[in-house]
Amino acid sequence: MILLIHHDSGSMTTIIVGFTAIALYCATGFLLAFSLYKRSQSPVSRGQLIALGMAATLLHAFELQEGLFTSQGLNLGFFNAFSLFSWLIALLVLMAALSKPIENLGIMVFPLAAISIALEMLFPSQHLLLLEKAPPGLQAHILISVLAYSLLSIAAVQSILLWVQDRQLRSKHPGGFIRALPPLQTMETLLFQLIGVGFILQSISLISGAVFLENLFAQHLAHKTVLSIIAWLVFAVLLWGRWHFGWRGRTAIRWTLSGAVALMLAYFGSKLVLELVLHR
């Protein structure tokens, strides 16, 4: 059951925390970019960059929970949902960076997270989901869907970075940007690891949705369901092509971005129309 109600602005403490998180995200993104192009002159270490990013995500989590968890239920209004996804993506990137060389994805991920906080504070809205009345299976479906979307979004960012790396290598004039990144083969391996895990989670999400939702093709779910299935098919073809034909490079990048766009439209496209255009 979903209700729409008016959302009050947050406390001054929440606003201060939000602006601090924005500043830390921007600082981390800038330092990552600076480190890529000026590796020998980097003012901070890799560990310090990760720690700075973690501090930003902790403050983001505090700011987010103030608007996300209400006495009436879970607030998944458009900008709250955008902030939630961007926070989870940033957190997953930082956690993965502890063991894999993917912290440079933060160049795109952290500014996006900063923007999501600003939009959430500037344009408060509510779309309440009463989770206490939802069965555990439906709650698990929501959690798995969020994780799948976040991982596949990270894969999309990874593919963009891979495209830039591939283009510079083809130009035969690699700069500091390329020298600071892992080898192309390592980047591709990381990309398909992200896609593989995200694809498994998305498969579970679609199956659990079919089991626990009354009608996946109801009017308010039809576009989301169709686009999610299209995205699933795109990633399925990509993984099959990788396994059978060794797809890589630009082919893998195009398929990854196509699937990510379909998935983004599945959630945020339908949510944008329903909440901000139709006010439903």
Image (cartoon, grey):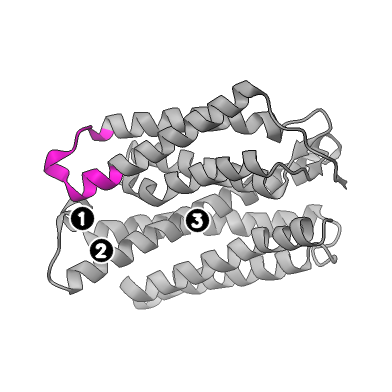
Kindly identify which numbered label has been placed on residue 165: 2
Q: Give percent across and percent down for residue 119.
A: 60, 45
**Looking at the image, is mark 1 or mark 2 earlier in the sequence?**
2
* Residue at horizontal 32 percent and vertical 58 percent from the top: 189
Q: Mark 3 belongs to which amino acid?
A: Ser
**Looking at the image, is mark 3 or mark 2 earlier in the sequence?**
3
Numbered range of the magenta stretch: 32-46
**Is the residue marked by circle 2 packed among few (<14), some (14-19), or many (20+) residues within 10 Å?**
many
- Structural distance between the alpha carbons of marks 1 and 3: 22 Å
**Which residue is disc 1 drawn over?**
177
Are the residues tagged 1 and 3 within 8 Å (C-beta)?
A: no
Does residue 57 appear in this view?
no
Per the image, is 80 magenta? Answer: no
* Residue at horizontal 34 percent and vertical 34 percent from the top: 50
- Structural distance between the alpha carbons of marks 1 and 2: 8 Å
Q: At numbered mark 2, what does the secondary structure look like: helix, strand or loop?
A: helix
Kindly identify which numbered label has been placed on residue 17: none
Q: Give percent across and percent down for residue 61.
A: 56, 31
Q: At numbered mark 3, what does the secondary structure look like: helix, strand or loop?
A: helix
Are the residues tagged 1 and 2 within 8 Å (C-beta)?
A: yes
Q: Nearer the viewer, residue 83 or 219?
A: 83
